[in-house]
Every structure is written in C-alpha cells, then in structure tokens.
Amino acid sequence: MKISGICILLFLGNFSANSQAVQKNKIKIGAGISLALPVYNLDISTTGGGVDVLLQYGLSRSVNLTGDVGFTGLPGKGVYPSTAIIPIRLGLRYFPVPKIYIAGKAGLGHYTILKASASYTAYAAGAGYMISKKFDASCYYDGFTNNNSSFGYIAIRAGYQF
C-alpha cells in the first residue's frame, strides 16, 4: 500500500512540471521507433516495426503542429511476402494537461508488397505521455484507405526530441 501511494504521488507530482514538447513559436525535430501490431485487413502480416522522423512547431502552450515521415515493415505470415508502408503526414498534438497529449495526423501513405504498390490516404489517432523534455511514449491507430481497400495497425512508439 505504501509503495502504491508513493507511486501515485510521484505520478501526480509530474503534472506540476511544464514538460510540453515544444515552446510556442519554436521548432523541434525528433525520431522514434515503433512496434506495429496488424489489426485490420492485414491478415497475411505479423507484428513488425518502424522508424520515423517527427517535426513539431509550437502553436501555443498546449498545441503543436506536427509533420512526420516514417517507414513501417510488416513481415509476412508463412509464405506470404513482407509489406512496407511509408506515411507522410501533418497533424496536431494537443496537451489537455502537462505531459499528456492526444494527437491526430492525416496525409499520404505508400504501400508496397512484392513489386506492387499503391497510394493511400493515411490517418492516425492516438495519445501519449511526455516522460521528460526529450522522451515520450505513445500508442495510436494508423489507418490507410483508398478506393479499393483499407487497412490499419496499432503502433506503440518511443520517441526522442533532439
């Protein structure tokens, strides 16, 4: 009981520090790695991973404009080939309280499997926690859709701000 009480106090104490990722009118660049779990129309794929570069611009104390480019690879199940996904998106991060944010992004996604490829509308929604001024962790849904198909995965991301 004492340990859980101490953990709660430490957690709540973190909210008193202002640890928003970017100050107003400032730009920061960061990079991240993610674990990708296929959840929608990716039956031939297994758990994969990705990397990304994230640019943030502080619009206010609680809102950041974001832009990201990434690469996610999903290995194929059994004899099925691997899938490569490259999203390029713009979005917003909103901090309702210090350290915790919700985020949304939209843009273009390029999907490749074997020699076939297609462009998709890419979108993502999720939430994250600023562990410190340099590190954050987040979880989000990445979705892709076009006239012919749609698919998506859940990603767990660890990021670093330079």
Image (cartoon, rainbow, N blue to C red):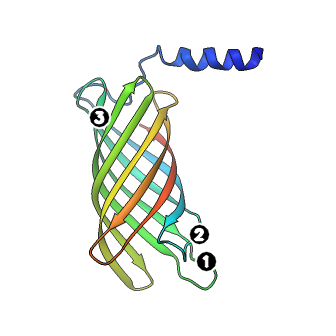
Give above or below for 77 relative to 143: below
Cβ atoms at labels 2 and 3 below 8 Å apart: no
Q: Residue at image x 45%, y 49%?
A: 140
Q: Which residue is mark 1?
A: 77
Q: Position of residue 136 (x, y in %)?
A: 49, 36
Q: Secondary structure at mark 2?
A: loop
Give above or below for 52 relative to 6: below
Which amino acid, mark 2? Thr
Q: Quadrant of the N terminus?
A: top right
Mark 1 Cα within 10 Å, few/some/many (few <14, many 20+)? few
Would you say 79 lies left or right of 104 here?
right
Which amino acid, mark 3? Asn
Which amino acid, mark 1? Lys
Q: Nearer the viewer, residue 104 or 134?
A: 104
Q: Residue at image x 47%, y 71%?
A: 41
Q: Which mark is residue 66?
A: none
Q: Position of residue 14 (x, y in %)?
A: 52, 18
Would you say 153 lies left or right of 118 here?
right
Which callout, 2 or 3, points to the residue nearer the camera?
Answer: 2
Mark 2 or mark 1: whose residue is earlier in sequence: 2
Mark 3 Cα within 10 Å, few/some/many (few <14, many 20+)? many
Cβ atoms at labels 2 and 1 below 8 Å apart: yes
Q: Which residue is mark 2?
A: 46
**How many numbered marks, from 0 up?**
3
Q: Position of residue 62 (x, y in %)?
A: 31, 26
Q: Which residue is mark 3?
A: 64
Would you say 115 lies left or right of 11 here?
left
Q: Quadrant of the C terminus?
A: top left
* Marks 2/3: CA–CA distance: 33 Å
Q: Residue at image x 52%, y 69%?
A: 74
Mark 3 or mark 1: whose residue is earlier in sequence: 3
Q: Residue at image x 40%, y 86%?
A: 115
